[in-house]
Image (cartoon, grey):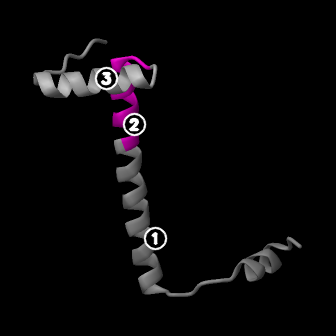
Amino acid sequence: MAISVRLNPQDEKLFRSYAKTNNISLSELFRTAVFEKIEDEYDLAVYREALEEYDKNPISYSHEEVCRILGIE
C-alpha cells in the first residue's frame, strides 16, 4: 500500500536530512515514528489503568517479597 504525505519544504528538508544522517529511508523514518507514537500511547494507557488499580488497592511489595512469594531465591 502506498501512502502520500504532504510536507512543507522546511519539514521535507529536515526529514530528508535526518533520514540521510541515520542511513534510513523516509518510509522507515515515518513507519518507525508512527509505531513509536502508538507504543507510547499504549504504554500511557496501561500506566493509567495500573495507577487506577493501585489507587483502589495501594498494596506494594519489595523485590525480596516478590521473590519469596514466587519461591525464587
Residue 4, position as x, y percentages in the image: 20, 16
Q: Residues within 10 Å of mark 2 (few under 14, many from 20)?
A: few
Left or right, 71 with respect to 25, comes to: right
Query: Circle 3 is placed at which residue position?
Result: 17
Tell me the tag on residue 67.
none
Please tell me which residue lies in front, 31 or 68. Answer: 31
Q: Nearer the viewer, mark 1 or mark 3?
A: 3
Q: Residues within 10 Å of mark 3 (few under 14, many from 20)?
A: few
Which of the marked residues, 1 or 3, is nearer the chain's N terminus?
A: 3
Does 73 appear above or below 30?
below
Of the 4 image quadrants, the one containing the N terminus is top left
Q: For the view shown, which residue lies furthest in the right direction? A: 73
Main secondary structure of the magenta stretch: helix
Which of the marked residues, 2 or 1, is nearer the chain's N terminus?
A: 2
Residue at left 12%, top 21%? 9
Tell me the tag on residue 50.
1
Residue 26, position as x, y percentages in the image: 33, 19
Residue 25, position as x, y percentages in the image: 39, 17
Residue 6, position as x, y percentages in the image: 13, 21
Residue at left 34%, top 27%? 18
Residue type at mark 1?
A: Ala
Q: CA distance from mark 1 to mark 3?
A: 40 Å
Q: Nearer the viewer, mark 3 or mark 2?
A: 3
Secondary structure of the residue carrying numbered label 2: helix
Please tell me which residue lies in front, 69 or 11. Answer: 11
The residue stretch that appears in magenta: 24-36
Query: Circle 2 is placed at which residue position?
Result: 35
Left or right, 9 with respect to 60, comes to: left
Q: CA distance from mark 3 to mark 2?
A: 21 Å
Q: CA distance from mark 2 to mark 1?
A: 22 Å
